Image (cartoon, rainbow, N blue to C red):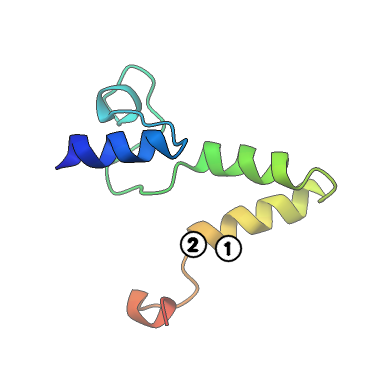
Amino acid sequence: LEAALLEQLATLGYTCASDDVIGPDGIQPERNAYDEVVLTARLTATIARLNPALPPEAQADAVRRLTQSELPNLLEENR
């Protein structure tokens, strides 16, 4: 099932990387732990690329808002 989904994502233009590469124990780790679901460096770079006129402080604030919950309960956060 995973292989079929990854293949479909690739046909849509997505680039897939395995945990062997970007996982915490990978050869080019992009996260410190498996519970880090957002690849912060990629998010930061993408926000900067898509919003070059946005001041760096505003870009950093966008990353913070996307990666840190402001409510104590995730169910409330997702409403």
Residue beneath label 1, please? 65
Amino acid at circle 2? Gln
| Tag 2 and tag 1, C-beta contact below 8 Å | yes
Q: Position of residue 47 (x, y in %)?
A: 66, 46
Q: In which quarter of the view is residue 29 placed?
A: top left
**Mark pair 2, 1: CA separation:** 6 Å
Q: Is residue 20 above or below residue 71?
A: above
Residue beneath label 2, please? 68
Closer to us: 16 or 21: 16
Q: Is residue 8 above or below residue 23?
A: below
Q: Residue at x 43, y 40 (%)?
A: 12
Closer to us: 17 or 22: 17
Q: Residue at x 19, y 34 (%)?
A: 3
Q: Is residue 53 left or right of residue 10?
A: right
Amino acid at circle 1? Arg
Q: Position of residue 18 (x, y in %)?
A: 29, 28
Q: Give the farthest residue toward the top.
A: 27
